[in-house]
Image (spheres, rainbow, N blue to C red):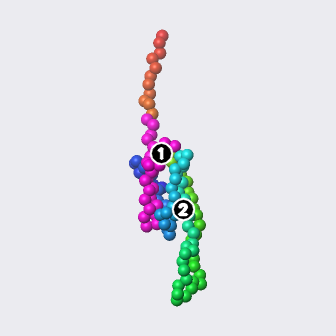
Amino acid sequence: VKETDNSYEVDIDLPGFKKDEIEAKLENGYLTISAAKGLDKEEKEEKDGKYIRKERYSGAMSRSFYVGDELKQEDIKAKYEDGILKLSVPKKEQKKVETTKHIAIEG
């Protein structure tokens, strides 16, 4: 997570995942990124041999970040490229602190 002047930039490594295996959702002020992958069952045996051993990751992951209740889904930008999910989450506007106001005392 990297902070810039106007936003937080989040880079999440998801090598081997396809875009449609990744989900980003905003609920109750939490941005949740989840990804799930199973082994491809449609892979067919090669005519010239069969696999003795295959090692591939399969499983699911999930990570949540609190981003505040004020953000809307359309405020958050997401891009998936080269196995990296890049999120841009705008900072909420800081509430301006009122300057000191003096109260006149009668008497």
**Few, some or many residues within 10 Å of mark 2 (<14, 14–19, 20+):** some
Residue located 54% across and 54% down the image: 32
Q: Which mark is residue 35?
A: 2
Q: Which residues are magenta?
A: 69-96
Residue 81 locus on image (x, y percent): 42, 64
Residue 94 locus on image (x, y percent): 44, 40
- Residue type at numbered disc 2: Ala
Towards the viewer: 82 or 2 = 82
The vertical placement of 72 against 95, above or below, is below
Towards the viewer: 15 or 35 = 35
As for residue 35 lying within the magenta part, the answer is no
Q: Is residue 66 visible?
A: no
CB-based contact (under 8 Å), mark 1 and mark 2: no
Tag 1 residue: 71
- Residue type at numbered disc 1: Leu
Q: Which residue of the protein is positioned furthest toward the left in this rendering?
A: 5
Q: Secondary structure at mark 1?
A: loop
Of callouts 1 and 2, the N-terminal one: 2
Q: Which residue of the protein is positioned furthest toward the top in this rendering?
A: 107
The vertical placement of 14 against 31, above or below, is below
Residue located 57% across and 79% down the image: 54
Residue located 49% across and 61% down the image: 12
Residue 39 locus on image (x, y percent): 57, 72
The vertical placement of 103 against 44, above or below, is above
Q: Which residue of the protein is positioned furthest toward the bottom in this rendering?
A: 48
Residue located 47% across and 12% down the image: 106
Towards the viewer: 46 or 16 = 46
Q: CA distance from mark 1 to mark 2?
A: 22 Å
Q: Secondary structure at mark 2?
A: strand
In the image, 86: left or right of 40?
A: left
Residue 38 locus on image (x, y percent): 57, 69
Q: Is residue 11 visible?
A: yes
